[in-house]
Image: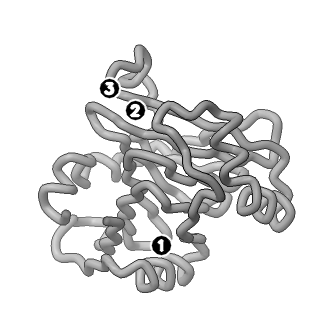
Amino acid sequence: MSILTIHSETDFDPYKRFSDYREIAAKLDEIGVLFQRWGASQPLLNDADQEAILAAYADPVARLKQKYGFQSADVISIDPDHPQREALRQKFLAEHTHSDFEVRFFIGGRGLFYLHPGQQVYIVLCQAGDLISVPAGTPHWFDMGERPILKAIRLFTTPEGWVAEYTGRDIATRFPRLEEYVELCG
């Protein structure tokens, strides 16, 4: 189940919690974040490769490419045995921005996006079927967990792909990581 909680930037508690898809989408739309649910056009095997995955989601990917000018799409897959899982996790855990959208469609697994517009922190637990698009310039960070299971389509407008501009703020240290969040809010 997808979850959205909204917090003060200074403290995790108290917070507002939403688990209804429509409410989550509406609340995120207020801060310019797109949140949608997608379905595959054909059944996918658990070990489906990038080509099969992109073919199964060709229509919604094409719509986003046309609407926002995305030039490429790929699939990232990280599991508990991934040799770079801890290095990748650390790279995403510090607050940062991008000069481009950050778009992820979760095919499998889960991940936790922390969005920091203004003086609030929006925490979004994304699951399989969820698409989230974080606008350029929005401070945020992401946690895939200590033992990640994550498979997602990524879309990019630039050939460089994912390029972070770190803010240098320590705000990410004041909020629970994925496993603790699920225990508290799930």
Residue at 48 percent across and 55 percent down: it is 140
Residue mark closest to the camera, 1 vs 3: 3
10 Å crowding of disc 2: few (<14), some (14-19), many (20+): some
The count of marks equals 3
Q: Quadrant of residue 63?
A: bottom right
Q: Secondary structure at mark 2?
A: helix
Residue at 46 percent across and 37 percent down: it is 46
Task: Give the residue pinned by disc 1.
Answer: 118
Quarter containing the C terminus: bottom left
Q: Position of residue 165 (x, y in %)?
A: 60, 42
How far apart are the alpha carbons under marks 2 and 3? 11 Å
185 lies left or right of 20: left
Task: Give the residue pinned by disc 3.
Answer: 80
- The residue under label 1 is which amino acid type? Gly
Q: Indicate whether 85 appears above or below 33.
A: above
Q: Quadrant of residue 31?
A: bottom right
Q: Position of residue 160 (x, y in %)?
A: 77, 33
Quarter containing the N terminus: bottom left
Question: Of marks 2 and 1, which one's residue comes earlier in the chain?
Answer: 2
Question: Of marks 2 and 3, which one's residue comes earlier in the chain?
Answer: 3
